[in-house]
Amino acid sequence: MAKVFIKKAAYHPPLIHDLVAEMFDSMGANWIDRGSRVLVKPNLLLPAAPDKGIVTHPMICRAVVQYLLEKGARVQVSDSPGIGSFRKILSETGLKEALEGLEVEVKPFENSIDIDIGEPFGRIPIARDAIEADVVINLAKLKTHAQMYLTLAIKNMFGCIVGLRKPEWHLRTGVDRIMFARLLVQIYQAVAPSFTIVDGILALEGQGPGKSGQPRELGLLIGGENGHAVDETICTLLGLDPAELVTSAQARSMGCFDGHVHVSGDIHIVNDFTFPEMNSLSMGPASLSSFMRKYMLQKPVVDKKKCKLCGECWKLCPAKAITTNVHGVQFDYNACIRCYCCLEMCPHGAIRAREPLLGKVRRRLTGS
Ligand code: SF4
Ligand code: SF4
């Protein structure tokens, strides 16, 4: 049975250090040998201060790195951010300062190797450093996600797809949320982290996972060897049936997880967490698709007052569905695959997901 630990926590260095050590020690941490190469993979989505609730807090990264160094491991910290230079991310997130004085290699993922993750995707490029490390430690952030509902342990491994290959895989799975969830589960299985810690001390609720979300203090660190068990436990803590989290539902249907979890620690149910609004990504006969996509399906919209016309969204949109004219940013909702990369990456929090009125009416009438 998979074990999951929940600890009440705050960002105080001695406390975090002790909690991280307690979590690892309670699992035996027998996967860390002296001299083994350990890759630590935090969530470094974009340049954002830790109080925005967007990136894994640098204090947690430091505590984990310190623990691994004390065990004699050779440690590397890496991610492949969505936007911004890695150097800028290190300084704005405070990670550079946090890791000062520690013998650790900090660098972005750069090279990939093709790994067969199974049908239907076959061989896909995954960061070489993640595949070749002896041990991978997954340091995820507890955040909402406009496309996938939540981004936790499983989704964090999508960061092992290097740079611009991420939008390519969004495009390949298209509007099919289930297919994208399968891809995420298969990437997680291929990288196979030995341990996951999810930073839910300062979480992100609402229109996450980027700057449109709202930081929310939950004061929780959640850890375990099995990322699926960690994710399902977090769903339960947030009052969400794990079957409603599409990555968890897919993991079960693919036989990656049997749902048996032993939870210990400070179990604390959060009753008022704000999830993003979600509806189906595709529906109805093809002949009506264009109308439905525009007037009934949830879609990205821009807040013109916040938009600085920086160009990040149209540069990264995998479907090339964003252009500009004299009225500002424009979306082609027929081309848009509702991946919400634009919402995730907008450095000014100017994009949110909105369900048109007709869609809300339909949903109320049909209950779907
Ligand atoms: S919506 Fe955001 S990312 Fe796009 S141009 Fe405006 S500020 Fe930049
Ligand atoms: S417009 Fe936004 S949601 Fe639509 S495909 Fe482009 S990045 Fe994805």
Image (cartoon, rainbow, N blue to C red):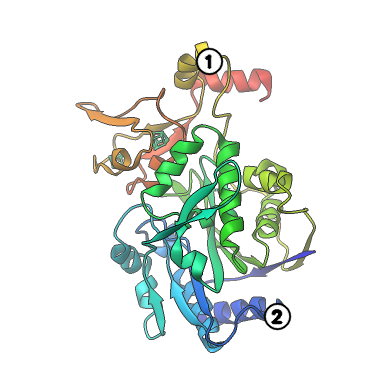
Residue at 23% across / 26% down in the picture? 327
Where residue 81 appears, as percent x and y from the top left, is: 38, 57
> Is the N terminus in the top left, top right, bottom left or bottom right quadrant?
bottom right
Counting every numbered tag in the picture gives 2
User: Which label was assigned to residue 321?
Assistant: none
For residue 355, above or below residue 118: above
In front here: 303 or 76?
76
Name the residue carrying label 1.
286
Horizontal and vertical percent for residue 328? Answer: 25, 30
The alpha-carbon separation of the residues under discs 2 and 1 comes to: 54 Å
Would you say residue 100 is visible in this rendering?
yes
Question: Disc 2 designates what residue?
Answer: 28
Cβ at disc 1 under 8 Å from ligand 2: no
**Which quadrant is home to the C terminus?**
top right
Secondary structure type for disc 1: helix
Q: Residue furthest top?
A: 287
Residue 339 seen in render: no
The x, y position of residue 129, in whole percent, is 45, 67
Which image quadrant is residue 97 in?
Answer: bottom left
Q: Secondary structure at mark 2?
A: loop
User: Amino acid type of disc 1?
Assistant: Ala
* Residue at the extreme left: 326
Q: Residue at x 51, y 11 (%)?
A: 287
Question: Dividing the image into four equal quarters, which quarter contains ligand 2?
Answer: top left
Q: Residues within 10 Å of mark 1 (few under 14, many from 20)?
A: few
Amino acid at circle 2: Gly
Could you say where residue 206 lies in the image, as x and y percent from the top left?
52, 44
Quadrant in the rendering for residue 167:
top left
**Going 49% across and 50% down the picture, which residue do you hit?**
124
Asked if marks 2 and 1 touch (Cβ < 8 Å), the reply is no
- Quadrant of residue 168 within the rendered picture: top left
